Amino acid sequence: MSESPLTSRRGFLRTAVVLVPAGALAGCEGGAQSSAGNAQQSGGSQPGQTQAQAAPYKPRYFDAREWAFVQAAVDRLIPADAEGPGALDAGVPEFIDRQMDTPYAHGALWYMQGPFQQGAPELGYQMKLVPRDIYRLGIAAVNAYANKAYGKDFDALDANTRDALLANLEAGKVELDSVPAKVFFGQLLQNTREGYFCDPIHGGNKDMAAWKMIGFPGARADFMDFVNQNGQPYPYGPVSINGERT
């Protein structure tokens, strides 16, 4: 891409809002829990419950080393700055971990019969790995590369080195044993975007901070009066599927 999300937050947000469908902003794809009770069991906060009162989220799929990688990586993909919260503040790691228990992450809705051959890009995804496997194998491979090149796991690297390594993964300049670098980076980046802009019921976009930042109304029943008011900020805060308001 001409403007890397690693070097320009503004550029990342421009591309992310275009690439994540409007419907996905209100309810991200993947079949994650859709009830208030399920969200509470997964560590999500409910109306009237502050972040301080909510129990810290414990990953279900990722082990401790993988969890450290996910947090360190998404923190560099969307760092906090004056424009808005970062991926960590928005709960993106929780969103990704919760997605690993959905049919999407298991490839249950994909055609996964062989032969698996590298095809032209316009043919779409052709690998035998499902998202869960891409993460498990990709994180292990990146940590192995980081240890060989820098003597540390990815999460122990300084911010500039993490940025450089992520940029090399994006460009396919790193050889990983078990999964192509571009495939792994693309999976991580897409899920980071989804977790940042999804409805909070799925674990990300805590307090609807990302929606407030871009002026998205969320799951409001009617906002058609404001659709054609180009350039005018939306005057009301967003509403989540659970009915939370800001």
Image: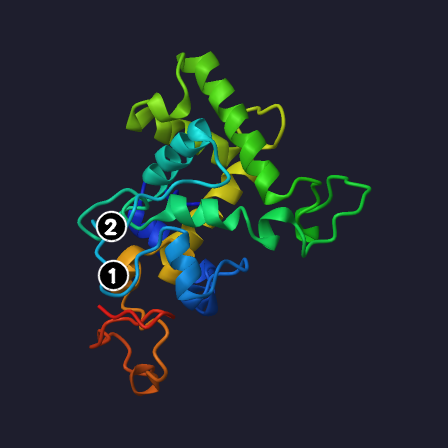
Residue tagged 1 = 213
Instruction: Estimate the x, y position of residue 143 in percent, counting from the top left.
Output: 47, 22
Location of residue 50 with respect to 230 vertically, above or below? above
Q: Nearer the viewer, residue 148 or 244?
A: 244
Asked whether disc 2 touches disc 1, contact meaning CB atoms under 8 Å apart, the reply is: yes
Is the image coloured rainbow, by chain, by secondary structure, or in one colour?
A: rainbow
- Is 121 left or right of 142, judged from the image as shown? right
Q: Residue furthest right?
A: 115
**Residue 28 point in image, percent of width and height:** 47, 61
Q: Indicate the amino acid at tag 1.
A: Met
Residue 69 lies in quadrant: top left
Q: Which residue, given by chain and number where applicable, does mark 2 sit on?
A: 85
Residue at 55% across, 48% down: 101
The CA distance from mark 2 to mark 1 is 9 Å
State the image coordinates of residue 153 (x, y, percent, origin top left).
41, 20
* Residue 198 visible in the picture: no
Q: Is residue 121 left or right of residue 138?
A: right
Dot 1 alpha-carbon crowd within 10 angstroms: few under 14, some 14 to 19, many 20 or more: few
Up/down of 150 relative to 88, above or below: above
Residue type at numbered disc 2 = Pro
